[in-house]
């Protein structure tokens, strides 16, 4: 194949197993003029494995904006560029949104290749009652923010990334406000020591009592009485903003089609 001129490619790379890359991705990486990557040292290992000699230019969250003009000028000269992240699909919790927005503003086309992503890899191997889920990226670090997230998304299966250094504390924080919650947790996906567990939070904490290693993807399942929990969260959220019970009843009734009197009664109880 021949990469088209004035074309910017989004190219997923393996999240663990170096063989998890498509033939098309290899072809594109070989034929473009420049590869924009988070860490040139990480990407170079992949390129060396597949004997790809293309020039690499660093592009990460700390230099996103200053690199935009460079890539625009390269494209205007007829060169082609591929964007990769250290692992997985660019712009899924990785840099890329800044340059893609500028490319589209300046009339350049963007072509995204399908490929490895921790979210879809994880979701394809855990049980779910339906197709809906909420992905929030990396979960906040503070306990207060974590508990707010856990309450906010009580009505849906919510999915997040976390580090092995923080995940156990994160789960304890979630458990403090969602004691009955079940979770699915995956670590080291596609790697030698890949592991996926599905259980209550106390059981998962016991399973990893000696510590946990690897990249983490976790999903907290929706509560059985999720609608009631979500209404309660919305009421408390509006109360914290200074709204009165009657005002809250009207707002939630209009926004979510709820019974105003029922919402008002619930607001009085909280």
Image (spheres, helix red, strand yellow):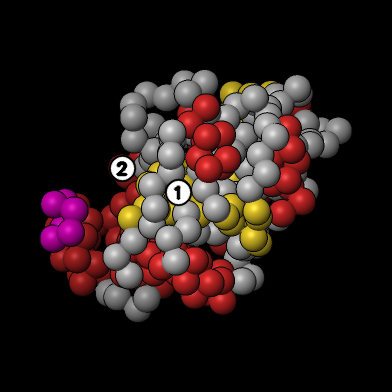
Q: Name the residue under label 2.
A: 227
Mark closer to the chain start, 1 or 2: 1
Of residues 182 and 192, the one nearer the viewer is 192
Closer-to-camera residue (203/7): 7
Magenta stretch? 253-258
Residue 268 image offset from top left, x and y in percent: 30, 62
Q: Residue at x 73, y 32 (%)?
A: 49
Q: Height in image: 87 above or below 209?
A: below
Q: Is mark 1 on a helix, strand or loop?
A: strand
Give the labeled residue for mark 1. 9
Q: Does residue 244 appear in this view?
A: yes
Q: Give the residue at the far right of this rendering.
A: 210
- Measured as percent of width and height from the top left, residue 92 is found at 50, 49
Neighbor class of circle 2 (other Cα within 10 Å; few <14, some 14-19, many 20+) is some
The quadrant of the picture occupied by the C terminus is bottom left
The residue drawn where x is 28% and y is 55% is 266
Q: Do the CB atoms of the residues marked 1 and 2 lie less than 8 Å apart?
A: no
Q: In the shown orientation, is residue 113 left or right of residue 88? A: left
Horizontally, residue 74 falls left or right of residue 44, namely left
Magenta residues, dominant SS class: helix
Inspect the magenta stretch and tell me whether residue 254 lies in it. yes
User: Quadrant location of the N terminus?
Assistant: top left
Residue at the image point whose x is 33% and y is 26% from the top: 130
How many marks are shown on the rendered structure? 2
Please determine whether, in this image, residue 96 is positioned above or below residue 125.
below
- In percent of width and height, residue 75 lies at 44, 63
Q: Which one is in front in this view, the residue at disc 1 or the one at disc 2?
A: 1
Name the residue at 13% across, 60% down. 254
Residue 66 painted magenta: no
Instruction: Indicate the secondary structure of the residue bearing disc 2.
Output: helix
Taking the image as shown, residue 11 lies to the left or right of residue 163, namely left
């Amino acid at each position: 194949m021949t990469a088209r001129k004035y074309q910017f490619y989004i190219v997923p790379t393996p999240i663990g197993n170096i063989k998890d890359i498509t033939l098309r991705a290899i072809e594109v990486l070989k034929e473009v003029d420049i590869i924009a990557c988070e860490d040139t040292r990480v990407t170079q290992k992949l390129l060396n494995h597949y004997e790809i000699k293309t020039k690499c230019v660093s592009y990460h969250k700390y230099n996103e904006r200053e690199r935009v003009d460079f890539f625009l000028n390269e494209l205007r000269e007829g060169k082609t560029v591929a964007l990769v992240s250290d692992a997985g699909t660019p712009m899924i919790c990785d840099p890329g949104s800044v340059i893609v927005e500028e490319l589209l503003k300046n009339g350049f086309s963007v072509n995204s290749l399908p490929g490895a992503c921790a979210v879809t890899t994880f979701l394809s191997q855990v049980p779910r009652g339906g197709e809906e889920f909420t992905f929030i990226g990396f979960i906040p670090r503070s306990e207060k923010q974590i508990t707010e997230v856990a309450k906010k998304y009580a009505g849906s299966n919510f999915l997040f990334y976390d580090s092995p250094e923080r995940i156990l504390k994160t789960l304890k924080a979630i458990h403090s406000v969602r004691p009955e919650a079940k979770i699915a947790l995956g670590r080291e996906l596609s790697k030698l020591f890949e592991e996926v567990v599905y259980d209550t939070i106390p059981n998962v904490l016991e399973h990893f009592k000696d510590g946990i290693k690897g990249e983490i993807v976790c999903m907290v399942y929706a509560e059985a009485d999720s609608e009631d929990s979500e209404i309660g969260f919305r009421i408390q959220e509006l109360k914290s903003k200074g709204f009165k019970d009657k005002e809250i009843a009207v707002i939630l009734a209009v926004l979510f089609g709820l019974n105003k009197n029922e919402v008002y009664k619930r607001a009085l109880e909280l």
